[in-house]
Image: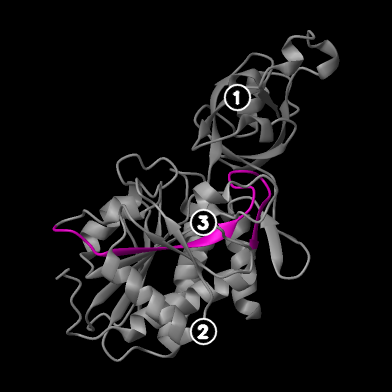
Amino acid sequence: MEQSRAFLECLLGEPGPSGFESRPARVWRDEAGGFAERVWADVHGNSFAQVGADRRPRVMLAGHVDEIGLQVTHVDKDGFLYVDGIGGWDPQVVVGQRVVVMGRTGDVPGVVGKKPIHLLKPEDRKKVTQIRDIWVDLGASSAEEVGEMGVRVGDPLVLDAGVIQLAGDRIASRAIDDRVGAYVVLEALRLLAAEPPESAGAVAVATVQEEIGYTGGGARSSAFALDPDVALVVDVTFATDVPDANKKELGEHSLGGGPVLTRGSSTHPVVFEHLADAAAEEEIPYSIQAAPKASRTDADGIFLVRAGVPTGLISIPNRYMHSPNEVVSVIDLERAARLLAGFVRRLDGDMSFVQQ
């Protein structure tokens, strides 16, 4: 348990926005090397860990390892950086934050600057700040000094917000979306390595570019390469145990209430029922979420690959999504890992997901 917690904190701590995931991916593969039969990466940066290579059915367990971030678009003559978003940002949460720029010679700290409220016109004080209205200050005095610090146009950056322990088993951090999904699938594989299923094999995948994966991201290419018999995707969803949450739209999902199972759009009905049965057998509480349109997860990039992949979606309730302080319950992560392992163990070689 202590090893898994250290792994989680290390994984969350490494910066890795979409398109620049190599550092957390390396942490993930290093951890997988301790128990997986085979560990590898592909040209896109997806990372794989396998147990039971000769067993069938083959189950793909996918969680994306990328996070939202920013990217340098311009360095002015006075040394200020201008940026654009990598993934979906509420610009209000960026204002006044500390950042880490992933420069070519190492990480460079900076702060987000904006015109002080004292200098804003009264009518401008009510306007929503846009990313184009802010800049990043490294403390440099010129573009040349910025270059000497190892920073150039195109470098990614993340908000400097590491893991903190809150009350009980709750933690806060940036990158929880969806670094915890990559964590859960590897923890499930750890359980399967310790207690192998009779029939099925599994490949955990830390996918890349989900936050900008408008064509399926790394989930699509990795699913094509693996050609799995069934896939389970782990992501986060909105916790609705906070003020002003619209439960009529989102459902009722609480921190500590267990994983969330999705029905609709890219998820397969037979896979859902097997997940529900596995949850009952493992005595894992769960809630259900409807997704009549796109799920906005890696499931959308997997379920139509090749001739189609029966896919399930398991989500972790998450407060304050796409902010520097997302909040989850660690018990939900543990339960999700046990659910995935339980699902795989219940499969047999004659399992069919064809709907009759």
What residue appears at the point 30 percent right and 66 percent down from the top-left corner? Answer: 231
Q: Which residue sits furthest right?
A: 118
What is the number of the mark on residue 236? 3
**Badge 3 amino acid:** Val
Q: Residue at x 41, y 40 (%)?
A: 212
Report how far apart the C-alphas of labels 2 and 3 lie in the structure.
21 Å
Q: Is residue 227 above or below residue 151?
A: below
Residue 149 visible (yes or no): yes
Q: Residue furthest front?
A: 248
Above or below, 226 relative to 100: below
Residue 220 image point, x, y percent? 28, 52
Residue at numbered disc 1? 131
Q: Earlier in the sequence, mark 1 or mark 2?
A: 1
Determine the image quadrant of residue 19. top left
Judging by the rendered image, the residue that carries numbered circle 2 is 283
Which colour style is shown?
one colour
Of labels 2 and 3, earlier in sequence is 3
Magenta-colored span: 307-328
What residue lies at 56% left-to-right and 70% top-to-bottom?
258
